[in-house]
Image (cartoon, helix red, strand yellow):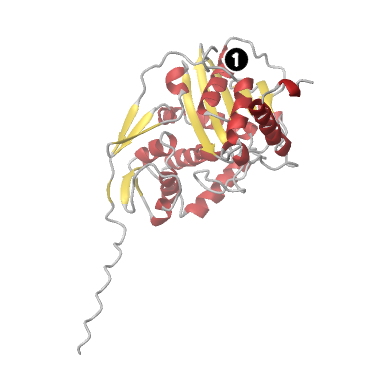
Amino acid sequence: MVMKFLTGRMLNSVLLVASVFAAVPAAATPVLVVDVASRDVLYQEDAGVPWYPASTTKLMTALLTFEALRAHKVTLTTPVVMTRNATKQAFLESGLTFGRTMTLEDALYATITASANDVAVALSETVAADEPSFVARMNERAAQLGMTGTHFASPNGLFSKQNYSTARDLAILGMEIDRLFPEYRYFFQATAVAIDGKEIKSNNLLLTRFNGTVGMKTGFLCASGRNYVGLASQNGRQVMVVVLGATTERERNERSAQYLKQAFEGRLPAREGRVDDISNRSDVAPEDMRVRLCTDQSAAYEVSREKLYPMGLPGHESNLQQEMPGQLHAIRTWESDTLANVPVPVPRPVEVQ
């Protein structure tokens, strides 16, 4: 009865939205909110479902680097050199080329704040013998932390079916970093870096739009959607929030801020056990969001998400606060003198006629 009152254009839009959800089940994307001190779960949706973590993977890269610093295997001034392997990484914004070098401290800023995929790999090659050795250590450390739904395939989180985690595991990882290394919290608080004058901003908008935000890391792949692992502190209380699979940056930022705001206002009472007690799902594979987010069907999917999460859209209240000043960290690189230069090819001899 309703269909005959729709215009042709409206009907096509309805059918397009329906086709998206016929092809891909409209499952909730994972969310987890945790009181850090008690580890009580304040809210969760599918927190044990596997997901592609994207650049939130770099939290484990940071943890292993912090542990290497504490063990005196490296120092904050240890040179991190851009190798051939590092410069092969995809989605590079750093502008760094083979042989460029920075301190390990600056490499941490580039990895965490700028989410530089190439620098994350160079950092792993500095902390361990090589990238595969570092990745093996990532998985060993995940097992030690009880991250039973996690497997890492790289230090940077670029797409691989072998690189997956859960909201539960990422919350445990983030809380462990802050618990063990409060002295390195400053790495997560920069809002931009300038690499040899080229500014790259952090995607963690909550650093300047939600009071008390400590960090930690954002991530995006077409397969994962927009992810966030965040930690905030107000009035002596710390809350961890994990949002995976958000459609837009607005959705990710608004939802993350909303969960934090509700937690600090006492509107998310602890009633779902502790984060460690959440069961990770080994019976399902990670959702692949590419059809929803990076194809001609993405517009219809985005419309459906805006209806679910309209916060911050025109006519709707925002959970974000007035912008606060950010922190810019300047990085200077130099040419390494430890890498052998590639020999210049010898010209062919001229044949004598």
The front one of 22 and 158 is 22
The amino acid beneath tag 1 is Ala
Per the image, label 1 sits on a secondary structure element best described as helix
Residue 108 location, quadrant: top left
Residue, far right: 1
Q: Residue at x 29, y 62 (%)?
A: 341
- Judge left or right: residue 24 versus residue 87: right
- Locate the C terminus and report the quarter of the image it occupies: bottom left
- Judge left or right: residue 347 versus residue 291: left
> What percent of the width, then of the height, locates residue 35?
61, 20
Q: Residue at x 39, y 16 (%)?
A: 324
**Residue 226 sits above or below residue 150 on the image:** above
**Residue 299 sits above or below residue 37 on the image:** below
> What percent of the width, then of the height, locates residue 236?
51, 13
The front one of 192 and 233 is 192
The residue indicated by pointer 1 is: 263
> What percent of the width, then of the height, locates residue 31?
63, 27
